[in-house]
Amino acid sequence: MRNARKHIIQFLLLLLVWMLLVYGVNLLMAGRYMLQSFRRISINDGLFGALNFILFYSCLKWMIPPFLETKNIKKLLALLLPVLMGFILLKYTIALNFFPEEVLYRGYRIEHGQRVEIYTTLQQYLVNGLWSSAIIVMAAFAACFFILWLEEDKRRTILQQKQLQAESGFLKMQLNSHFLINSLNSIYSLALTGSPEVVTANKTLTQLLAYMVNQPAGIENREPVTAEIRYLQDFVTLQRIRTGCDTGIVFNWPAQLPDKRIAPLLLVPFVENAFKHGITNRPEKPVTITLQGDEQQLVFSVHNFISGTYHDKTGGIGLENVRKRLQLIYPAQHQLEITGGKEEYFINLTINW
């Protein structure tokens, strides 16, 4: 039922466009002779224009699509020629019986001093009708190719979106697994030393994992900035528990932020990188995380002093993957600056909402 309704609506819309182009334009061009031309235009472009549209729609829907699939020109001609001849004969029969003056009359000639009216013969009408029908068939072919191009473009766009989602999901999975490895190593270290903080660390890790797992796979997914801040707070808490130095990490964010949304898990790799390479247990050289935002953009920065000892060899994918995710999710809406030397490392990320 829904399919039939869709086809009826499509038919009526195409008919409306066809009649506006053929009948409406000719009416406008009639100008001051409209009263004299109205009947002729209504018959030739209105009635016969509607018949031409039925031929056009028949070709568009039932004759050309099978040909485009099979490329069988003989089958197309065997189907098309009888239909064209049938439409031409139908129009000639209507014109001959009802509208000979408006459709078939061609003028007059003088024979033996008498005026003889001239009308289009069936043979002449067939020749002219074949030419005009050929134009209608070519228009139907053009419309078919245009519709196929639109459908192919739509399919291509959907495939690109799915590819981007798959790539983004794969990159996020790599980042998440990398984070999980580091977090479990930290909790394992606390457990080995018998630290009572291992319970709090485990609870915090559970909250972090719950937030990660609950994220949809779509590339268009966005979370409130406040949710990302809570996630970063839990992440920082876990690191402070591991190092036992609360003042070795400074996290600054405004008391109020605009009600904006951001792609989830996009900021944490920069913080993780600072913890991994930086000094986190010396208050005089803290890891400093700063987040600011207004109605136009979000500015996120991380600064750390570089540690002389680093043993984690699993983190090479972190920053490279977050670069790729930024290109996928915010292709022309972000700026990422990374500067560093032997002693300090600084990143600054700007995202335009």
Image (cartoon, helix red, strand yellow):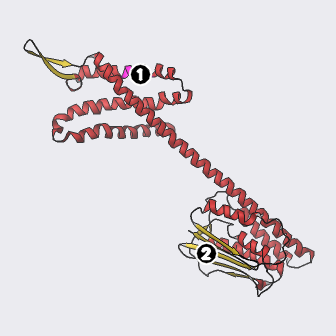
Q: CA distance from mark 1 to mark 2?
A: 68 Å
Extreme residue toward the top, this view: 112
In this picture, residue 286 sits left or right of residue 106: right
Asked if residue 338 is positioned above or below residue 35 in the image, the reply reads: below
Amino acid type of disc 2?
Val
Residue plotted at (46% across, 21% down): 77
Q: Which residue position is annotated with label 2?
A: 299
Q: Which residues are magenta?
A: 80-87
The vertical placement of 94 against 24, above or below, is above
Q: Residue type at mark 1: give it.
A: Val
Q: Are discs 1 and 2 less than 8 Å apart at CB?
A: no
In the rendered structure, the answer to whether residue 48 lies left or right of residue 314 reads left
Q: What x and y, as percent, mark residue 307?
A: 81, 78
Q: Residue furthest bottom?
A: 284
Does residue 242 appear anywhere in the picture?
Answer: yes
- Choose the circle earlier in sequence order: 1 or 2: 1
- Circle 1 crowding by C-alpha within 10 Å: few under 14, some 14–19, many from 20: some
Q: Is residue 1 visible?
A: no
Residue 334 falls inside the magenta stretch: no
Judged by its main secondary structure, the magenta piece is helix
Is 81 a magenta residue?
A: yes
Please name the residue shown 48% across and 27% down the image. 63
Q: Say which quarter of the image contains residue 47.
A: top left
- Classify mark 2: helix, strand or loop: strand
User: The C terminus lies in which quarter of the figure?
Assistant: bottom right
Query: Relative to 343, is 1 above or below?
Result: above
Residue assigned mark 1: 83
245 vs 113, left or right, is: right
- Residue 301 image position (x, y, % from top left): 66, 76
Looking at the image, which is closer to me, 331 or 209?
Answer: 331
